[in-house]
Amino acid sequence: MEKRTGIIIFLFALTAQASGATVLWDASHGEYGYVPSAWFSELSDHIAGYGFEIDTTYNGFLVDDPESYDIAVVCAGSSKFTSYTTEEAEKIKDFVVNGGGLLIMGEMNLASNERLQPVASAFGVTLGVSEIGSYPYAVYTSDFAPHPLFNGISEIGFQSVGEVSTSGDLIEVAWYEGTDKALVIAGEYGPGRVVVLGDINIFSSFQSGRYYDRADNRQFSVNTFEYLIPEPVTVLLLGLGAFFIRSKRRRDFQQSNH
């Protein structure tokens, strides 16, 4: 009976993992509204309908370990004042190598990305290679590679977007139309996955800037987070014990932040 109960619990955990995931958003380097409780609140509410739950850390990943989560997010708008250290970048890289998903949201130029660049560099990515578009900086594209990120997507809209480039294992998957300038980079990195966007506004909703409502941005956000969930086979390999460890760590994090 005990063995059967364990199997049932494990299958339930596997089903829950397949339908959604837990997300840890890092705002420890200074945020200016670009967090789930403010300008990404509609994003947070929308993907919650698909089973995702977002927590925000102001302590950083060296204190609040992302290993208890499925997906980590780092954003140029949530790192406005101080730079990521080499130790933090290595911690995030280890998280991905161990099967986690990582979303990196860059901006339009090198100056906007300098504090976030150490994380991107850990994956062979350069942010803000060039600014794309002219005033008012609205850029739309339908130039996609065949990729799960763009299932059901005909167009995505950016605001003040920057070109991104890769020299590592990740690949370019979307470009500024008529050019070879990449706007989105994605791919597997070991057992984990990474998505890099050249814009922090694509999923944001604030004041008059309803960028999240542009084109197919809402569906693109769902596709992005679903792509970053570890594959069910990865969860199976982690085993039941790992599931309980992750759950306990996350409960401990939530209790310490309330």
Image (spheres, grey):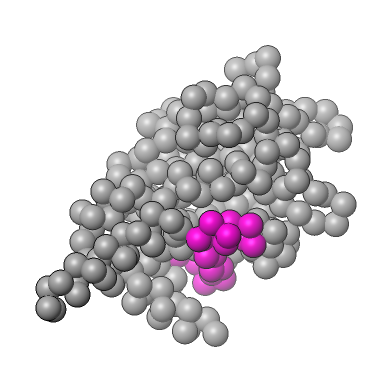
Does residue 110 appear left or right of residue 22 in this picture?
right
Q: Residue at x 68, y 14 (%)?
A: 178
**Residue 253: % across, % down:** 44, 77
Looking at the rendering, the stretch of residues picked out in magenta corresponds to 44-62
Which image quarter is the C terminus in? bottom right
| Nearer to the camera, 44 or 25 | 44
Query: In the rendering, at what x and y percent does residue 148 appear?
Result: 47, 35
Up-down relation of residue 243 to residue 216 (above or below): below
Front one among 237 and 200: 237
Image quarter hosting the N terminus: bottom left
Position in image of residue 107 (x %, y %): 67, 42
Decide: is 216 above or below 52: above
Front-lying residue, 147 or 256: 147
> Residue 166, position in %: x, y?
48, 29
Magenta stretch: residue 52 in it?
yes
Residue 106's quadrant in the figure?
top right
Q: Identify the residue shown where x is 68% and y is 30%.
A: 155
The number of numbered badges drawn on the structure is 0
Examine the image and state in which quarter residue 239 appears: bottom left
Q: Who is closer to the viewer here, 131 or 212?
A: 212
Seen from this angle, which residue lies furthest top? 178
Task: Report whether residue 38 is seen.
Answer: yes
Relative to residue 12, is residue 241 drawn left or right?
A: left
Per the image, is 255 magenta? no
> What residue appears at the point 48 percent right and 30 percent down from the top-left corner?
147
Relative horizontal placement of residue 106, taking residue 132 as reference (left or right): left
Q: Is residue 247 above or below residue 256?
A: above
At x 64%, y 62%, the residue is 45
Residue 83 in view of the camera: no
